[in-house]
Amino acid sequence: MTAPTETRAAFAALNGNTPEELFGALPTPCYILDEAQLSRNAAVLDGIRRRTGCRILLAQKAFSNFDLYPALAPALDGTEASGLFEARLGREAMPEGEVHVFSAAYRAADIPEVLRYADHIVFNSPRQLSLYGEAACAAGCSIGLRINPECSTQEGHAIYDPCAPGSRLGTTRAQWDAEMTPALIALLDGLHFHTLCEQDSDALETTLSAVEEKFGGVLLRMKWLNMGGGHHITRPGYDIARLERCIRRAQTAWNVTVYLEPGEACALNAGFLASRVLDVRKNGDTNIAILDASAACHMPDVLEMPYTPPLWSAAEPGMLPCTFRLGGPTCLAGDVIGEYAFPAPLKEGDLLLFGDMAIYTTCKNNTFNGMPLPDIYRRGADGALTPLTHFGYEDFKGRLGTREQPHFHRKGTANHG
């Protein structure tokens, strides 16, 4: 399939080469993680750290491919975890960095182990703070409380809006006033808010004003403020200067150490999902291509967010001669990746390359319908491809029951004693 030159940021790492030239020998579907792009993202983040003195963490919920952590670690101060397993991964895979943990609610059975890995632990509610705050203090952790400034700055992605009405995430000012006792306040070292989703720093500036209005007096007694994730810092055109003004504003107003915990910004445009066309058909006026990759299984955010991922050489429907609806091979009628226009009709065996697939893919994929998980490859700074992991039948089966094959007796041979 011939195509015009691809210039979008999601495919900049290809350096003008076609997917077939670079990845045609790989089995599909597969993920390819690009080490050079991770390092470029890291350099942007490191510049912000050096200029402002803030501290930056990798939010592992977006990117947790630990083999690639060395490309990011020099620019980071540690990792952010959403629970026990991510906390352990952060401690093991980036051992020189801090480990920050936040969970909407902790299980009592997990707390002792969480506290072994965590440097900072953030609670979601005064009740959780009252249950586990003293144990965290005794373990030497720095303790925080997540706040909800009740300031929505996004539209169209309600599933990712922690400030939506009735949100379960964070403590509002009314809840603080009703439930935070002097003893609980005395346990706190910092406050945490996370309200953004793929947004620019103007949204952070708006949110910071809401935080100041509702919790400014509280912050005067704190040591740190964690501004969470959702900052699209490494996206072309992101207003870094405004972000740095927000950081300095908080440092000056409250004399706090400022933390950021981006996930997407760390691995933005640093990965691909390669897939081949299995079948081409037509239903009425709609051209359909069935791929060996699934939106539902291999890129869940396409359906959850929802969004249409970037695809090499393709354009919006109608902008090129041939428009196709791309879908996965599962039985889910809605397993549709999106509609794209191509320079020429698709055919069986064509290699398609989706961009920006390092984030919220390998950490969220699943085996619905018994779909195999895609293998993962690292593309080194020199362009060399290295297999990181292969998934097979046992990975599917092992999630569903006993991992060892049970022993069955033939009929009539059981020993009844």
Image (cartoon, helix red, strand yellow):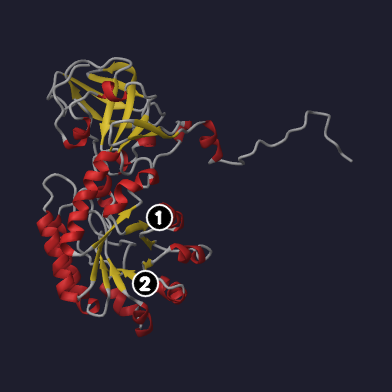
Q: CA distance from mark 2 to mark 1?
A: 18 Å
Picture coordinates of residue 124, whole percent (x, y)? 36, 67
Q: Residue furthest right?
A: 417
Picture coordinates of residue 83, whole percent (x, y)? 42, 58
Residue 346 falls in which quadrant of the image? Answer: top left
Q: Is residue 316 above or below residue 262?
A: above
Picture coordinates of residue 281, whole percent (x, y)? 30, 16
Which residue is at 38% across, 44% downward?
A: 65
Give the secondary structure at mark 2. Answer: strand
**Crowding at mark 2 (Cα within 10 Å: few <14, some 14-19, many 20+):** many
Nearest the viewer among 304 and 268 is: 268
Q: Which mark is residue 90?
A: 1
Give the secondary structure at mark 1. Answer: helix
Image quadrant occupied by the N terminus? top left
Q: Which mark is residue 302?
A: none
Nearest the viewer among 154 and 58 is: 58
Residue 372 shown left or right of residue 407 in the figure: left
Disc 2 target residue: 143
* Mark before the other along the chain sequence, 2 or 1: 1
Residue type at numbered disc 1: Gly
